[in-house]
Image (cartoon, grey):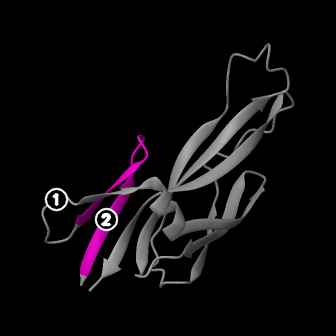
Amino acid sequence: MQVRVIAGVVAGLVVVAGAGEARGGQVITEERVAQQVVVRDLRVRAGAVSGLVVNNARKPLRDVRLLIRHQWIWKNERNPGPDNPGRVAYYTVHEEIPPDVSVAFKYRPNPPLPDRSDGHFETTVEVVGYSEVGE
């Protein structure tokens, strides 16, 4: 069995390295990654994030790595406070996901997000890496 590790980088490119291959791998675009693995039905309740990771690739995937951003939006953007409670977290869905199948995930921040009156959180989730399982 061959495993290809795919990880996103800030520049928008993705590096692919296969087990038993040279570590150079190949480079694929962020758009291709976005087509192969999708987060759907995202819900945020009391800071907890849940949704579905959908495998649109032709091969099974595992170790799908998600970047969860809790961006703090100030009520008064012109005079923000001194302590921005926004944060980011990485969460990995370790299950193997066959092609055309979705897997549910749930993430709870620890410590929990603060309940404040001077703004609110906007939460986003994006796929930043995964392993492709192949023959």
Quadrant location, the C terminus: bottom left
Toward the viewer: 6 or 112?
6
Instruction: Point out residue 82 in the picture as x, y percentages from the top left corner.
Output: 69, 16
Toward the viewer: 105 or 2?
2
Q: Is 29 positioned to the left or the right of 67 in the image?
A: left
Residue type at mark 2: give it: Val
Callout 1 secondary element? loop
Quarter-wise, where is residue 76 in the image?
A: top right
| Disc assigned to residue 5 | 2
Residue 97 visible, this angle: yes
Instruction: Point out residue 40 in the picture as x, y percentages from the top left corner.
Output: 67, 67
Q: For mark 2, does the 10 Å Cα neighbourhood hold few (<14), some (14 to 19), or many (20 or more) residues?
A: many
Residue 56 shown in magenta? no
Toward the viewer: 123 or 6?
6
* Residue at the image position 59 percent from the left and 79 percent from the top: 102
Specify start and end residues of the magenta stretch as a single range.
Answer: 2-17
Q: Mark 1 or mark 2: name the one nearer the start of the chain.
A: 2
Q: How many marks?
A: 2
Callout 2 secondary element? strand
The residue furthest top is 79
| Disc assigned to residue 111 | none
Quarter-wise, where is residue 126 in the image?
A: bottom right
Instruction: Point out residue 42 in the picture as x, y percentages from the top left corner.
Output: 71, 62
Q: Is 20 positioned to the left or the right of 60 in the image?
A: left
Quadrant location, the N terminus: bottom left
Q: Which residue is mark 1?
A: 23
* Residue at the image position 62 percent from the left and 65 percent from the top: 39
